DNA sequence: AGCGTTGCTACATTAAATGTAGCAACGGGA
DNA sequence: TCCCGTTGCTACATTTAATGTAGCAACGCT
């Protein structure tokens, strides 16, 4: 079963400070998590396709992150492969300004 | 000197794919990075104060992340301690929807 | 049956983070 | 001037996480 409360696993301190943003930052601040959500933005991917999209990251860690993301309710496994849930799509939507910011950042090109 | 191009260090694959968002996701997807930006949101903090804010994270990794964030142009060291640059404040601004999302997520409370 | 794909796991190696300690440099006081 | 607290930062041994390679069982297809 999925967790009933969106609390990130222990391992990174500050995960259970009670502030949801902390749990979220903790979860998103783990390797490949942001990338996975990003790669699923346009639709479902099979585990292998996701692995390819994530530059052949090790299946071990992808599986770990996918499990975490599923427990958090951001990702689900459908007949088409892994896919963002409605909640996951909401999460991705918050990245949109981040993407635009990244473009500006690249123009900035060093301090 | 700071890097001239906002390319995250090697170590995580997909850092130098040419797409700025990838380099940014890579940088932000490292432990404590998001948290540090978050904790600096309201003003400068000394390295010790930041460490306290980050739940006594090890100074080693905080220093590493601060160096990366400085090279990326998001953080600077002022007389008052570590502080977000104008660019860093822009970055933080993109977190605002994330914060609101985190609140919704906590209400959602498991799938 | 045979093949290819799926999601997923084992496990040894390598890399990163942690925790504790402590450094040199600066700034007050006394 | 000497002491004391603070600053930013580093060393280093231990613990934890990620990587890379291999391979499993289950499903679908022909």
Image (cartoon, coloured by chain):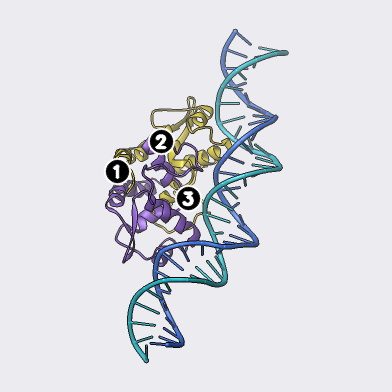
Chain colours: A yellow, B purple, C cyan, D blue
Image spot of residue A49 (x, y percent): 50, 27
- Would you call the spot at circle 2 few (<14 residues within 10 Å), some (14-19), or many (20 or more)? many
Is the same chain shared between marks 2 and 1?
A: yes
At numbered mark 1, what does the secondary structure look like: helix, strand or loop?
helix
- Would you call the spot at circle 1 few (<14 residues within 10 Å), some (14-19), or many (20 or more)? some
Sequence order check, earlier mark of 3 and 2 = 3
Mark number displayed over residue A38: 2
Q: Nearer the viewer, mark 3 or mark 1?
A: 1
Image spot of residue D13 (x, y percent): 65, 62
User: Would you name the residue on which mark 1 appears?
Assistant: A108
Alpha carbon of mark 3 to alpha carbon of mark 1: how far? 34 Å
User: Would you name the residue on which mark 3 appears?
Assistant: A8
Q: Chain of mark 1?
A: A
Residue drawn 29% across and 61% down? B43
Residue A19 placement: quadrant:
bottom left
Image-based side of D3 in relation to C14, left or right = left
């Amino acid at each position: 079963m999925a967790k009933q409360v969106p609390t990130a696993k222990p391992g990174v301190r500050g995960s259970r400070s009670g502030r949801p943003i902390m749990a979220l930052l903790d979860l998103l601040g783990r390797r490949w998590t942001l990338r996975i959500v990003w790669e699923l933005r346009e639709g479902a991917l099979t585990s292998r396709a996701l692995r390819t999209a994530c530059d052949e990251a090790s299946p071990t860690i992808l599986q770990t992150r996918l499990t975490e993301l599923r427990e958090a309710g951001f990702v689900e496994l459908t007949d088409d492969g892994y896919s963002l849930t409605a909640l996951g799509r909401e999460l991705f939507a918050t990245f949109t300004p981040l993407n635009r910011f990244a473009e500006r950042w690249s123009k900035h090109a060093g301090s």
